[in-house]
Amino acid sequence: MNREGIKVIIPLARKDVWGDGMLNAVKKEFGLKGGTMLDAVRYYPSTENFSHELSLLHSEVIRAVEVNGNSSVAVCVAAFDEILPIFSQANSDPVLSSVRWYDCDTSAIALSRNRNASEFAVSTHFLFPTYGIQSNSRYDQIRKAVMNETGREADTFAVNDYDALWLVTYTYLMVGSDDPDAFKWVFPLVAETYKGNIGWMKLNDAGDLENAPFTFVHMKENNGSFERTPYAIL
Protein backbone atom coordinates (compact mmCIF):
# COMPACT_ATOMS: atom_id res chain seq x y z
CA MET A 1 0.00 0.00 0.00
CA ASN A 2 2.82 2.36 0.86
CA ARG A 3 4.63 1.66 -2.42
CA GLU A 4 1.43 2.44 -4.33
CA GLY A 5 1.06 5.85 -2.72
CA ILE A 6 -1.58 5.03 -0.13
CA LYS A 7 -1.30 7.32 2.91
CA VAL A 8 -4.61 6.67 4.70
CA ILE A 9 -6.43 3.37 5.12
CA ILE A 10 -9.91 2.67 6.45
CA PRO A 11 -10.26 -0.91 7.68
CA LEU A 12 -13.36 -3.05 7.29
CA ALA A 13 -12.84 -6.00 9.60
CA ARG A 14 -14.45 -8.97 11.30
CA LYS A 15 -15.27 -8.39 14.95
CA ASP A 16 -13.30 -11.31 16.38
CA VAL A 17 -9.84 -12.18 17.69
CA TRP A 18 -8.44 -12.75 14.20
CA GLY A 19 -9.72 -9.36 13.06
CA ASP A 20 -8.18 -7.70 16.12
CA GLY A 21 -4.82 -9.29 15.37
CA MET A 22 -4.87 -8.25 11.72
CA LEU A 23 -5.80 -4.66 12.56
CA ASN A 24 -3.03 -4.38 15.14
CA ALA A 25 -0.45 -5.83 12.74
CA VAL A 26 -1.49 -3.62 9.81
CA LYS A 27 -1.60 -0.49 11.97
CA LYS A 28 1.91 -1.16 13.27
CA GLU A 29 3.50 -1.93 9.90
CA PHE A 30 1.66 0.79 7.98
CA GLY A 31 2.50 3.31 10.69
CA LEU A 32 6.20 2.51 10.40
CA LYS A 33 5.95 3.66 6.78
CA GLY A 34 4.33 6.93 7.81
CA GLY A 35 0.80 5.87 6.95
CA THR A 36 -2.34 6.50 8.98
CA MET A 37 -5.00 3.92 9.82
CA LEU A 38 -8.39 5.37 10.74
CA ASP A 39 -10.89 3.71 13.08
CA ALA A 40 -12.15 0.45 11.66
CA VAL A 41 -15.69 -0.38 10.61
CA ARG A 42 -16.33 -3.73 12.33
CA TYR A 43 -18.93 -6.41 11.70
CA TYR A 44 -19.87 -9.69 13.34
CA PRO A 45 -18.85 -12.83 11.42
CA SER A 46 -22.51 -13.90 11.21
CA THR A 47 -23.47 -10.74 9.27
CA GLU A 48 -25.15 -11.33 5.91
CA ASN A 49 -26.53 -7.89 5.07
CA PHE A 50 -23.71 -5.34 5.13
CA SER A 51 -25.77 -2.26 4.25
CA HIS A 52 -25.15 -0.63 7.65
CA GLU A 53 -21.42 -1.29 7.62
CA LEU A 54 -21.02 -0.18 4.00
CA SER A 55 -22.96 2.99 4.76
CA LEU A 56 -20.54 3.81 7.58
CA LEU A 57 -17.61 3.01 5.31
CA HIS A 58 -19.11 5.20 2.58
CA SER A 59 -19.12 8.20 4.94
CA GLU A 60 -15.58 7.50 6.16
CA VAL A 61 -14.26 7.29 2.60
CA ILE A 62 -15.88 10.61 1.67
CA ARG A 63 -14.27 12.35 4.66
CA ALA A 64 -10.85 10.82 4.01
CA VAL A 65 -10.91 11.62 0.30
CA GLU A 66 -11.88 15.25 0.94
CA VAL A 67 -8.68 15.70 2.95
CA ASN A 68 -6.26 13.40 1.12
CA GLY A 69 -7.61 12.75 -2.39
CA ASN A 70 -8.74 9.48 -3.97
CA SER A 71 -5.27 8.23 -4.90
CA SER A 72 -4.03 8.38 -1.29
CA VAL A 73 -6.98 6.61 0.37
CA ALA A 74 -7.71 2.88 0.46
CA VAL A 75 -9.94 0.38 2.21
CA CYS A 76 -8.18 -2.51 3.91
CA VAL A 77 -10.35 -5.58 4.46
CA ALA A 78 -9.91 -8.30 7.07
CA ALA A 79 -12.54 -10.80 5.95
CA PHE A 80 -13.05 -14.46 5.21
CA ASP A 81 -15.70 -15.82 2.80
CA GLU A 82 -17.98 -12.89 3.61
CA ILE A 83 -15.84 -10.95 1.15
CA LEU A 84 -18.33 -12.12 -1.50
CA PRO A 85 -21.46 -10.43 -0.09
CA ILE A 86 -19.41 -7.38 0.91
CA PHE A 87 -18.16 -6.84 -2.63
CA SER A 88 -21.47 -7.75 -4.22
CA GLN A 89 -23.29 -5.18 -2.09
CA ALA A 90 -20.55 -2.53 -2.50
CA ASN A 91 -20.49 -2.84 -6.29
CA SER A 92 -23.33 -0.34 -6.75
CA ASP A 93 -21.68 2.37 -4.60
CA PRO A 94 -19.60 4.80 -6.72
CA VAL A 95 -17.88 6.22 -3.62
CA LEU A 96 -16.63 2.84 -2.45
CA SER A 97 -15.58 2.06 -6.03
CA SER A 98 -13.52 5.26 -6.25
CA VAL A 99 -10.65 4.11 -3.99
CA ARG A 100 -8.27 1.16 -3.88
CA TRP A 101 -9.14 -1.95 -1.84
CA TYR A 102 -6.71 -4.41 -0.26
CA ASP A 103 -7.21 -7.63 1.67
CA CYS A 104 -4.98 -9.50 4.13
CA ASP A 105 -6.48 -12.98 3.78
CA THR A 106 -6.55 -15.60 1.06
CA SER A 107 -10.35 -15.98 1.13
CA ALA A 108 -10.71 -13.59 -1.79
CA ILE A 109 -9.76 -16.54 -3.98
CA ALA A 110 -13.53 -17.23 -4.10
CA LEU A 111 -14.26 -13.94 -5.92
CA SER A 112 -14.15 -15.55 -9.35
CA ARG A 113 -17.37 -17.43 -8.47
CA ASN A 114 -19.39 -14.20 -8.22
CA ARG A 115 -19.67 -11.74 -11.10
CA ASN A 116 -20.76 -8.71 -9.07
CA ALA A 117 -17.97 -9.27 -6.57
CA SER A 118 -15.43 -9.75 -9.36
CA GLU A 119 -16.55 -6.55 -11.10
CA PHE A 120 -16.00 -4.62 -7.89
CA ALA A 121 -12.57 -6.21 -7.43
CA VAL A 122 -11.57 -5.15 -10.94
CA SER A 123 -12.89 -1.59 -10.57
CA THR A 124 -11.01 -1.05 -7.29
CA HIS A 125 -7.79 -2.75 -8.44
CA PHE A 126 -8.27 -5.07 -5.47
CA LEU A 127 -5.05 -6.73 -4.30
CA PHE A 128 -4.91 -9.74 -1.99
CA PRO A 129 -2.51 -12.55 -1.02
CA THR A 130 -2.75 -16.24 -1.78
CA TYR A 131 -0.54 -18.87 -0.23
CA GLY A 132 2.06 -20.37 -2.55
CA ILE A 133 3.51 -19.35 -5.89
CA GLN A 134 0.71 -19.11 -8.41
CA SER A 135 2.99 -19.93 -11.34
CA ASN A 136 3.94 -23.25 -9.73
CA SER A 137 3.27 -25.88 -12.43
CA ARG A 138 2.56 -28.66 -9.89
CA TYR A 139 -0.02 -26.52 -8.16
CA ASP A 140 -1.53 -25.56 -11.52
CA GLN A 141 -1.96 -29.24 -12.40
CA ILE A 142 -3.76 -29.95 -9.12
CA ARG A 143 -5.90 -26.83 -9.39
CA LYS A 144 -7.04 -27.76 -12.92
CA ALA A 145 -7.73 -31.35 -11.91
CA VAL A 146 -9.85 -30.28 -8.94
CA MET A 147 -11.72 -27.75 -11.09
CA ASN A 148 -12.48 -30.38 -13.74
CA GLU A 149 -13.67 -32.87 -11.13
CA THR A 150 -15.65 -30.57 -8.81
CA GLY A 151 -16.19 -27.30 -10.66
CA ARG A 152 -14.62 -25.46 -7.70
CA GLU A 153 -11.39 -23.56 -7.24
CA ALA A 154 -8.75 -25.33 -5.14
CA ASP A 155 -7.43 -23.06 -2.40
CA THR A 156 -3.66 -23.31 -2.05
CA PHE A 157 -4.18 -24.17 1.63
CA ALA A 158 -5.69 -27.47 0.44
CA VAL A 159 -2.51 -28.20 -1.51
CA ASN A 160 -0.50 -27.36 1.59
CA ASP A 161 -2.62 -29.83 3.60
CA TYR A 162 -1.79 -32.48 1.00
CA ASP A 163 1.92 -31.83 1.53
CA ALA A 164 1.47 -31.91 5.31
CA LEU A 165 -0.23 -35.32 5.13
CA TRP A 166 2.73 -36.74 3.21
CA LEU A 167 5.15 -35.29 5.77
CA VAL A 168 3.24 -36.99 8.57
CA THR A 169 3.16 -40.27 6.61
CA TYR A 170 6.88 -40.29 5.82
CA THR A 171 7.74 -39.40 9.40
CA TYR A 172 5.60 -42.23 10.74
CA LEU A 173 7.24 -44.71 8.38
CA MET A 174 10.70 -43.61 9.45
CA VAL A 175 9.91 -43.70 13.17
CA GLY A 176 8.20 -47.06 12.89
CA SER A 177 5.97 -46.41 15.90
CA ASP A 178 3.60 -43.85 17.41
CA ASP A 179 6.13 -42.71 20.02
CA PRO A 180 5.50 -38.93 20.27
CA ASP A 181 9.05 -37.99 21.31
CA ALA A 182 10.58 -39.86 18.41
CA PHE A 183 8.02 -38.42 16.00
CA LYS A 184 8.73 -34.88 17.21
CA TRP A 185 12.48 -35.38 16.71
CA VAL A 186 12.24 -36.95 13.23
CA PHE A 187 9.53 -34.72 11.75
CA PRO A 188 11.74 -31.62 11.09
CA LEU A 189 14.45 -33.86 9.60
CA VAL A 190 11.95 -35.25 7.10
CA ALA A 191 10.60 -31.76 6.36
CA GLU A 192 14.10 -30.46 5.64
CA THR A 193 14.50 -32.86 2.70
CA TYR A 194 10.94 -32.84 1.36
CA LYS A 195 9.78 -30.70 -1.55
CA GLY A 196 6.02 -30.55 -1.76
CA ASN A 197 3.61 -28.95 -4.20
CA ILE A 198 4.07 -25.59 -2.48
CA GLY A 199 7.87 -25.82 -2.27
CA TRP A 200 10.52 -26.92 0.20
CA MET A 201 9.09 -27.87 3.59
CA LYS A 202 12.12 -27.03 5.78
CA LEU A 203 11.01 -25.65 9.16
CA ASN A 204 12.48 -22.84 11.23
CA ASP A 205 13.15 -22.87 14.99
CA ALA A 206 9.52 -21.94 15.68
CA GLY A 207 8.23 -24.93 13.72
CA ASP A 208 6.92 -22.81 10.85
CA LEU A 209 7.98 -23.08 7.22
CA GLU A 210 11.37 -21.42 6.78
CA ASN A 211 10.25 -20.14 3.39
CA ALA A 212 6.50 -19.56 3.15
CA PRO A 213 5.77 -18.20 -0.33
CA PHE A 214 2.87 -15.84 -0.92
CA THR A 215 1.69 -14.37 -4.18
CA PHE A 216 -0.22 -11.11 -4.31
CA VAL A 217 -2.83 -11.29 -7.04
CA HIS A 218 -5.54 -9.13 -8.55
CA MET A 219 -8.60 -9.84 -10.64
CA LYS A 220 -8.71 -9.25 -14.37
CA GLU A 221 -11.56 -9.60 -16.83
CA ASN A 222 -10.87 -11.68 -19.91
CA ASN A 223 -13.62 -12.05 -22.53
CA GLY A 224 -16.39 -11.81 -19.98
CA SER A 225 -14.81 -14.10 -17.39
CA PHE A 226 -12.74 -13.16 -14.36
CA GLU A 227 -9.45 -14.68 -13.36
CA ARG A 228 -6.72 -14.13 -10.79
CA THR A 229 -3.48 -12.66 -12.14
CA PRO A 230 -0.17 -12.70 -10.21
CA TYR A 231 1.01 -9.23 -9.21
CA ALA A 232 4.00 -9.83 -6.90
CA ILE A 233 5.65 -12.77 -5.10
CA LEU A 234 7.03 -12.82 -1.58
Image: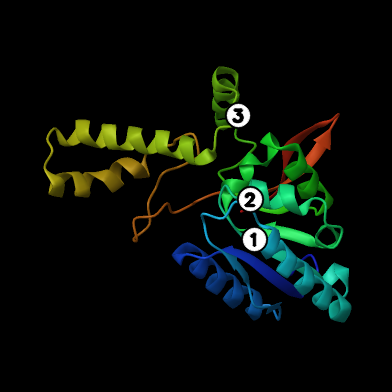
Q: Is residue 153 visible?
A: yes
Residue 229: where, in percent of width, then height?
73, 41
Circle 1 sits in a helix, a strand or a loop, which is it? strand
Viewer-proximal residue among 47 and 229: 47
Residue pictured at 59% horizontal, 64% vertical:
13
In the rendered image, which residue does mark 1 sit on?
77
Residue pictured at 62% horizontal, 40% vertical:
110
Cβ–Cβ under 8 Å for marks 2 and 3: no
In the rendered image, which residue does mark 3 sit on?
140
Q: Earlier in the sequence, mark 1 or mark 2?
A: 1
As measured in the structure, the alpha-carbon distance from the residue carrying label 1 to the one carrying label 3 is 27 Å
In the rendered image, which residue does mark 2 sit on?
83
Circle 2 sits in a helix, a strand or a loop, which is it? helix
Residue 49 left/right relative to 63: left
Cβ–Cβ under 8 Å for marks 1 and 2: yes
Residue 114: where, in percent of width, then height?
70, 37
Identify the amino acid type marked 3.
Answer: Asp
